[in-house]
Image (cartoon, rainbow, N blue to C red):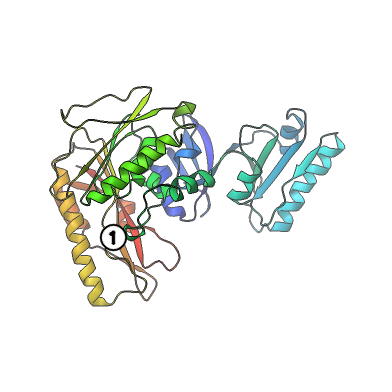
Amino acid sequence: MFMKYLAILGRQPEISLAELEALFSNVQGINKNLATFDSTTPPDINRLGGCLKLAIPLNKKPLEYMANLPAGKITLGLSDYSKNTTKKTASMEALKLKKILVRHGRSIRVVENKEAILSTATSLHNGLGGKNDRKIELIKINNDWYKVIGVQDIEKYAKRDQNRPARDAKVGMLPPKLAQILINLCGPLKPGSTVLDPFCGTGVVLQEALLMGYRAYGTDLNERMIEYSSKNLEWLSEKNFFLGHFGGHDRELGRSPRDDGRERPVSQEKCFFSLSQGDATNFQWDQPIDAVACEGYLGKPMSKIPTEIELKEQKQECGAIVTGFLKNLVSQIESGTPVVIAIPAWLREDGRHERLDILDLITDMGYNVNNKSREGLIYCREKQIVARDILILRKK
């Protein structure tokens, strides 16, 4: 049975929307911040890098719902996405609910609105949308009401990003949220599926794959990156990041041997990873490969907009690596295998991003290119020179 959910989208909503479309059915954008979707199983906010909050429709009037909450003090947060709403109107709506409930003998604290909507940090700090039935956040969209059931744990993302023992700013810092999005854009994967990252770097995609219940297979041209990935994945296990994932059960991290080339099933106790040094343009990977999610070579770091000559050189270098990798990969994966790769796009003086002109080549190699990726799913910070252009491919 399908149930409707509301998603509060991240800072780059077109990418968040694409993530939802890859995983769920009947995805409908309400505005640039909100989308609804249908799912037969409750979605896990910890697995959705592009969603800040998840909510379900409130089938009762807010006062009726809150009057029937368990005894004790209620903490209420309210985010108002209605048209023309302001901080003042959102606060007044929450205080109106409080006044009526106090009149009926309920004790209630209203979380202060600094804006019309509560930030993720505020919701998280106040414990809203969690397992405590008396700490709630309601979302109002005109005449519709929703109850928040999950808030993105930005503190956990930061911890497993910033505290990793092996980091290298020179190779770029892939955010864990984006790593999750790249994996999710592959579409629904069975538990224990093998996710390949052929440009694994310090292992961010690999760590997120493991936390999501998949086997992680990483290769990289640079042997030092393999050492870094190994350190980081071992650290991930030692620090018990697996607690709270996999449906609340802990799992032990183990290495998957690649000497016999046969698949080793993922047990209820272990989640395996495998690492090897190799060039993605000619490496022969072990099987099976159920999905590929990666950030390709982004070229040299840039602090200012490149000249036309610099841009041409970078496009040639990066394009050769990406197309060389995809040409090598296509004969090693089965038809229908998803391949999601972030490649570089460069900021220009007019504010647009110039992308690699390789989509026709990719199609000729034997891949289908998702239509939305042709329009461009650009992931970038404000004024960032080298952005990430996300391609969603699938072998024909």
Q: Position of residue 12 (x, y in %)?
A: 46, 56
Q: Position of residue 334 (x, y in %)?
A: 18, 36
Mark 1 secondary-structure assignment: loop
Q: Amino acid at mark 1?
A: Leu
Q: Position of residue 331 (x, y in %)?
A: 13, 41
Residue 338 lies left or right of residue 385; in this view the side is left
Q: Residue furthest top?
A: 268
Residue 334 lies left or right of residue 29; in this view the side is left
Toward which corner of the image does residue 387 lie, by quadrant? bottom left
Toward which corner of the image does residue 345 lie, by quadrant? bottom left
Q: Position of residue 127 (x, y in %)?
A: 64, 40
Residue topped by disc 1: 298
Q: Is residue 325 above or below residue 348?
A: above
Q: Residue at x 77, y 43 (%)?
A: 109
Q: Is residue 144 above or below residue 363?
A: above
Q: Is residue 17 visible?
A: no
Q: Please state which of residues 296 and 6 is positioned toward the viewer in this rendering.
A: 296
Q: Is residue 385 visible?
A: yes
Q: Residue at x 27, y 50 (%)?
A: 225
Q: Residue at x 33, y 69 (%)?
A: 302
Q: Residue at x 53, y 43 (%)?
A: 153
Q: Please state which of residues 257 and 351 is positioned toward the viewer in this rendering.
A: 257
Residue 51 lies left or right of residue 313; in this view the side is right
